[in-house]
Image (tube, helix red, strand yellow):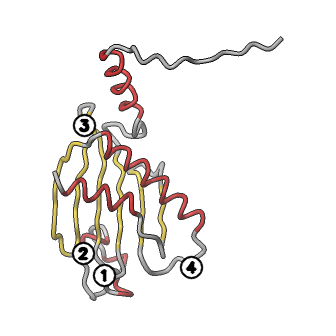
Amino acid sequence: MIILFGCVNDNSKSNKQSEFESQHSDQKMLGILDEMSEIEFLREDNKYGEWGGDIDLIRIYRYNDNTYADYLRYVGRNIPLPPPGEMDKKWYEYKTLETKIDSIKLSIKEKQLIEISIINLLKNKLRNENIPFDGIYNSVISKDSSIVIMDYNSFDWKSFVELKTSLKKK
């Protein structure tokens, strides 16, 4: 016996039901985040060759059931970093902080861009045949290390650039 079920597109949904569904789907976005976690997106260009380049950093976190981002831009220079054993802060913090925007409340579109950015970076990482030692560096790393994607000799990462542009406009 075969039973077939079909769905009918019912356009007569009430506004309250549609609003509930959009709120519910919003809660599923970035479900990996809770109030104790954070995801860090980092993009470094190769402006100074072996010394790296400028860095765009976006930190994503949740607070009181809302999702926020901090945006930081560090300007590179052609000076080597201290040896790892002598560093007392993160490697990119040795560059000059040019821009800092805190607590940007994220829209649904920006949350979608975050998810797309993670997927795009992962796909590029899986397909990247370059030897990982220089060039553009892109990464997504969660505070609890449940997500760690680091890609050297990377790509333009347009979804990240779109997210960065959107955050800077707020």
Instruction: Give the Cα separation between the discs numbered 2 and 1.
Output: 9 Å
Secondary element at image label 2: helix
The earlier-in-sequence mark between 1 and 4 is 1
The earlier-in-sequence mark between 3 and 2 is 3
Secondary element at image label 1: loop
Residue 111 drawn at (x, y percent): 34, 44
How crowded is the residue under tag 4: few (<14 C-alpha within 10 Å), some, or many (20+)?
few
Q: Which residue is mark 2?
A: 94
Pick out the residue farthest to the right. Answer: 1
Contact? badges 2 and 4 (CB < 8 Å)? no
Q: Which residue is mark 1?
A: 82
The earlier-in-sequence mark between 3 and 4 is 3
Contact? badges 2 and 1 (CB < 8 Å)? yes
Q: Which mark is residue 131?
A: 4
Q: Nearer the viewer, mark 1 or mark 3?
A: 3
Residue 84 lies left or right of residue 54; in this view the side is right
Contact? badges 3 and 4 (CB < 8 Å)? no
Contact? badges 3 and 2 (CB < 8 Å)? no
Task: Indicate the amino acid at tag 1.
Answer: Pro
Instruction: Give the Cα separation between the discs numbered 1 and 4.
Output: 24 Å
In the rendered image, the vertical position of residue 111 relative to residue 152, given as above or below: above
Residue 124 lies left or right of residue 51; in this view the side is right
Secondary element at image label 4: loop
Q: Nearer the viewer, mark 2 or mark 1?
A: 2
Q: Residue at x 50, y 20 (%)?
A: 9
How crowded is the residue under tag 2: few (<14 C-alpha within 10 Å), some, or many (20+)?
some
The earlier-in-sequence mark between 2 and 4 is 2
Q: Which mark is residue 63?
A: 3
